[in-house]
Amino acid sequence: MLLLTAHAQASPQDIFGHGARTSALGATGAASALGPEAVWGNPALLSLGRERTFSLGVQGALMHLSAQGDGLPGALDGEPMRGTLIGALLPLPFSGALQHRIALGFSFFTPTNVVVRGRVLYPETPQFPLVTDRAQSVTVQAGFGFDLGKGIRLGAGLSALAAIAGTVIVATDTSGAVGTKVDDQLVATYAPLTGFTYDLSDSYRLGITYRGQLEARFAVRIEVYDLGSLTVPPFNIAGLAQFDPWQVQAEVARVRGPWKTAVGVTFKRWSSYPGAPEPTVLCPPEKPNCQALKPEPPGFHDTAVPRVGVERTVVDREGWGATARAGYFLEPSPTPEQRGTERIFDNTRHALTLGGGLELRGSIPLSLDLFAQGHWLAKRSHRILVDAGTGRTGKATAGGYLLAGGVVASVRF
Amino acid sequence: MRARWTFGLLAVTAVRSAEASPLGTYGFSSRETALGGAVTADTTSASAVFYNPAGLALARRLELSIGYLRVNQRLLINGKDNHVDPVRGLNFGVVAPGVVARTPFAFGLGVHLPDERISRVRTLRQEIPRWELYDNRAQILFIAATLAVRPVPWLALGGGVAFLSSTRGEFGISGTANLKEPYDSQLRHRVDADLTTVRIPLLGIRIEPDERLSLGWTYRGESKLDLQLDADINGEVDPGIGNLRVPVRYGLSSKSFDAFHPRQVALGSSVRLSPSLRANVDFVWTQWSAYQSATSRSIAHLEVDLQGLPLAIPPDPKPTVVRDPGFQDRVTPRLGVEGVAVRKASFELSFRSGYVYEHSPVPPQTGPTNFVDSDRHTIAAGLGLLLRPGFSFFQGEVAIDLHGALMILPERTTRKSNPADFVGDYRQQGRQTNLGATLGTRF
């Protein structure tokens, strides 16, 4: 797996949420997630599951982005994202004291055509790295939840990605034929998911989820030999392709009654982001202070994302039920203002979410959940350096919107 | 002396995928490995994800399993060990059966995770002797999710997808390269790459004509790894003589395949000879004729306008000509026997044994290529302990399975048609040992 990016690329669940229900509820879930999507929302809530559940769904997003100003192209639309979602919830059928206490969950999201999209573009190339390529990433998660009793639940799990490390050597052999020798390896990287919930009362629940920093690095060393008097250093084609900062999501939810609500905030440690590009030429041990170019740190700052979601039971009959959902979250941008020749744009996003659910309770225990999201990128101006030679500056304005939607069918068996 | 380079394009495309190997080569789960893999009509555990997804529909309990496998390889050429990497890894499995619309239904998940990596890609020149089927082909992740239904009691259908990843991309490097002090080069790079999804189909049918006989059919799709590298380097050399600049252009194209795993179709039967004895026979057709060599196809071109400067520039190297490996399809018989030695209310003890004969698909290497291989005989054995502990909180079963297998590759002699062949004649033979255990919990 080769994962590449210009700046931080996180996973699609970090942009839109994970699963059709919580994505319709403002990407909440630390105190309110149900079913397989609780692996991401809060693995402790897996223990609420009483029936085996298998989910299959599709999800997509469109991105209309623009950057206006001197030398900027205007429209910078990202490639549409499409993918499939597979999830499973497996309550372990212990008996006695362990009955209804432990459950496992799995969840996979795979973009239709790519597992991960990664780009390391030159910083002067106009781009929206946080909302385009970062959506094109696989999600692999597994976890378990344990109900301790007295309203306390704990959960743990992991998210997984992969990184590549390898070498490509180009040289001629003894017969004079050119050959390339390739040796690269795909290695797994993991990040922990942990969760805690506490029932404040019969109707209200507190949930806290910690998601560890998930990153995937690529590093391909390319060596070219047999160029006579011409010598080139080994090329270090390397960088940080995928990056989710560690984050803590805290939430309080009303979980009973026809009206269910969730209010919370997610803290994201973006300041720990080291930057995607790495030096193209690495200094050898015998010359540790060589003059090779080294990328500047990106200067991201931490963010806090407030979220709210509301769910209303519309129909609750013996054979079926229906719910309507809505939510909102505000995703501040972690990127600094662009003041030099860089053209790395990102904006604070206002996300409005909607959705609904239909549940059949007869001989075919099937659920259907839908969601839609509209993200408005608040306009942001930058005083950019247009001509490095003369020092001339100009104004750049970035904005746009994202549309996302999906449907997930779940069967309980 | 400094050079100014603009690396126009340096593209690397790699496609990775996972299929049979290492599960097809060494087995998945201890019970199935001990039975020689002859389980197309006789497995309902998580290993059915690989052997026959339809078998999941016959599972009766939720099952979680974890196992470990280690294969040591002693593969010799002219009596010298080639130090082929061992295969080590964890196996995970989940089987979740249930009923939907009065129809038995099951979801299965199977994972083989190598200890050190998800996959390894290694290409060599075709003249270099290598154990083509056992070197890095087994160093790859297997992950698959399958569903199964049993619409009528005698028929089960299953299908799913095994997937991993593929990579396609483009690298660009620009800046100033310092020829005198290469590590002071002012270079930077850009990358535009995708890791694309690879899905490999897994299909299965299981028929149960009566209580004593099971029949099975499985299809597993083909997969391979493509690796492509294209470089187009444009630049100038500054020899330090006034404003003189020496234009330089270097182009490279390299394309190869690796980790090829052929399409397979398995037919199997399982006969219950008595309440305590079962015998299985499988035949697996493998389309080795579609095999593509892992050797890279490379072309390089260097243009330098020397302008009388005393620089030594080599001529263009000859392009690589990759020969058709000419592998042949094969049918592999697999046999397995399982008996229950002790059957009590609280536990059962079973013994298992299996045998596999795999004819080498590699033709005699009389020419310049050196794909080393030999026929392979696998003798496997194992024990299974099924416990019913009867705890108050756990009314299910715990299965502990052990396996050991010895794989013998008898001596084969390669004689070159050209007496002046660079490598010359050689003898190859080998031995592999496979040990492992699986712990399963059925709720």
Image: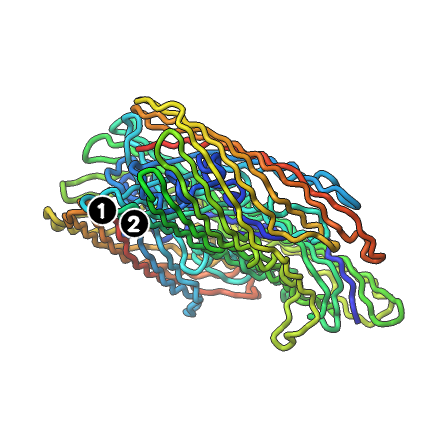
- The residue tagged 1 is A98
Rendered image quadrant of residue B109? top left
The kind of secondary structure element at disc 1 is helix
Q: Position of residue A20 (x, y in %)?
A: 46, 35
Farthest front residue in view: A201
Q: Is residue A281 above or below residue B376?
A: below
Nearest the viewer among A115 and A410 is: A410
Q: Is residue A164 above or below residue A13?
A: below
With A372 as the anchor, is B269 left or right in this view? left
Marks 1 and 2, Cα distance to the nearest angstrom? 20 Å
Nearest the viewer among A297 and A125 is: A297
Amino acid, disc 1: Leu
With B103 as the anchor, is A289 left or right in this view? right
Work out which quarter of the rendered image holds the C terminus of chain B and state it: top left
Q: Position of residue B404 (x, y in %)?
A: 27, 58
Work out which quarter of the rendered image holds the N terminus of chain B and state it: bottom right
Residue B65, labelled with which disc?
2
Farthest left residue in view: B344
Q: Few, some or many C-alpha atoms within 10 Å of disc 2 (few <14, some 14-19, many ≥20)? A: many
Tell me the subunit letter for badge 1.
Answer: A
Q: Is residue B211 above or below residue A165?
A: above
Amino acid, disc 2: Ser
Q: Position of residue A225 (x, y in %)?
A: 67, 66
